[in-house]
């Protein structure tokens, strides 16, 4: 059995969203060291505020200001902070109900150890030195032994100078991927500039890349079959937006390619032809990256286009 591979992988993209009047007021308020909530139909003050009542679904807009002090309602200790978390030393994740609020806000609580944290403890906001209109304007919560804030929140217009109208939230997932026996064999074959799939013992279809089981019959696959290297474009799209960290000029074409002998199309970039001349049925061949173990792109072979009936089941 070949050695099973594993590698660290990162999936990352920026999530951009516009803000309505409630969220805009909340984040702008944080920039100005002001915490706003919104009053629900039953009178409960929701912090963080939401745009619609969670019970009645009515639109909400009655903004109020709550205190920067509050009470821990529950918590969990984080002994090993990860990248981009609020603190780089061990801390507690805590739900804090601010004075005047009826719901709790999740954030970091700076404490010397888990023995120093308890449900019911009093805390206050530690504001970030530089504030931009984001939840990170609250650097964290810290223990507080002073007087509580007003129990009744004060009305607020939600109006600020230069309000925050949109945010960019980076989403990132770090994980270790173990491809398993079938995909490990597939990757190792790419080192030799070969493409291998596996044949289902029941329906006899060849799947590339292999998954170790037939997605149609649900039975294990083990018989390796070398496919390609040439193939047929079954369908494609024209990419007009340049991706971060990808050194490819737009527009370019990304396509589904059915390699000869395969019963499943794989993804690949098409180059060596103007983007507006790529078409279904175009016959292509791989161009391998220099010194790498993957195909850089596919280019036309110069053969006549494949007849639609030969690949229609793979579109």
Image (spheres, helix red, strand yellow):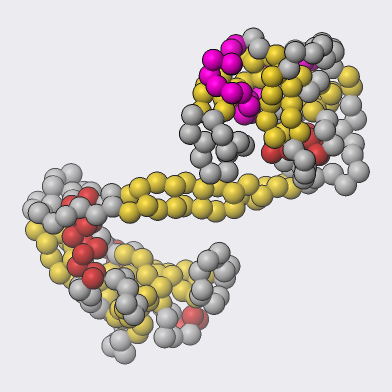
Residue 15 spot, x, y in % from top left: 61, 49
Q: Is residue 106 magenta?
A: yes
**Nearer to me, 236 or 22:** 22
Q: Residue at x 44, y 52 (%)?
A: 10
Q: Residue at x 64, y 9 (%)?
A: 120
Vertical comparison of 233 with 77: above or below: below
**Nearer to me, 157 or 114:** 114
Residue 238 spot, x, y in % from top left: 50, 71
Q: Quadrant of residue 191?
A: bottom left
Q: Is residue 193 magenta?
A: no
Q: Quadrant of residue 136?
A: top right
- 111 vs 302, left or right, is right
- 252 vs 150, left or right, is left
Q: Quadrant of the C terminus?
A: bottom left
**Nearer to me, 272 or 107:** 107
Vertical comparison of 60 with 252: above or below: above
Q: Residue at x 18, y 44 (%)?
A: 218
**Nearer to me, 303 or 171:** 171
Q: Quadrant of the N terminus?
A: bottom left
Residue 295 spot, x, y in % from top left: 32, 73
- 166 vs 14, left or right, is right
How many numbered marks appear? 0
Q: Residue pushed farthest bottom?
A: 302
Q: Residue at x 53, y 66 (%)?
A: 245
Q: Is residue 202 visible?
A: yes
Q: Which residues are magenta?
A: 97-119
Residue 16 spot, x, y in % from top left: 65, 50
Q: Is residue 20 visible?
A: no
């Amino acid at each position: 059995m070949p050695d099973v591979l594993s590698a660290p992988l990162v999936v990352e993209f920026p999530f951009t969203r516009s803000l309505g009047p409630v969220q805009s007021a909340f984040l702008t308020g944080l920039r100005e060291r002001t915490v706003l909530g919104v009053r629900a139909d039953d009178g409960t003050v929701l912090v963080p505020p939401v745009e619609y009542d969670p019970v009645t679904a009515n639109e909400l807009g009655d903004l109020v200001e709550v205190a920067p002090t509050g009470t821990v309602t529950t918590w969990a200790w984080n002994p090993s902070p990860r990248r981009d978390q609020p603190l780089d030393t061990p801390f507690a994740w805590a739900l804090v109900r601010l004075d005047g609020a009826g719901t709790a806000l999740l954030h970091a609580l700076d404490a010397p150890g888990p023995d120093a944290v308890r449900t019911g403890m009093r805390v206050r906001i530690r504001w970030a030195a530089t504030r931009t209109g984001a939840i990170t304007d609250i650097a964290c919560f810290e223990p507080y032994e002073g007087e509580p804030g007003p129990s009744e929140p004060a009305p607020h217009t939600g109006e600020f100078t230069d309000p925050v109208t949109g945010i960019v939230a980076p989403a990132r997932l770090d994980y270790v991927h173990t491809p398993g026996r079938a995909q490990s064999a597939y990757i190792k074959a790419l080192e030799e500039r070969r493409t291998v799939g596996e044949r289902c013992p029941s329906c006899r279809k060849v799947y590339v890349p292999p998954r170790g089981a037939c997605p149609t019959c649900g039975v294990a696959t083990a018989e390796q079959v070398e496919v390609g290297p040439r193939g047929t474009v079954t369908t494609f799209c024209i990419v007009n937006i340049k991706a971060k960290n990808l050194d490819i000029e737009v527009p370019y074409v990304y396509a589904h390619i059915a390699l000869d002998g395969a019963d499943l199309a794989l993804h690949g970039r098409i180059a060596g032809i103007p983007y507006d001349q790529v078409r279904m049925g175009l016959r292509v061949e791989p161009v391998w990256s220099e010194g790498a173990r993957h195909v850089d792109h596919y280019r036309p072979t110069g053969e006549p286009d494949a007849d639609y009936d030969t690949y229609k089941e793979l579109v």
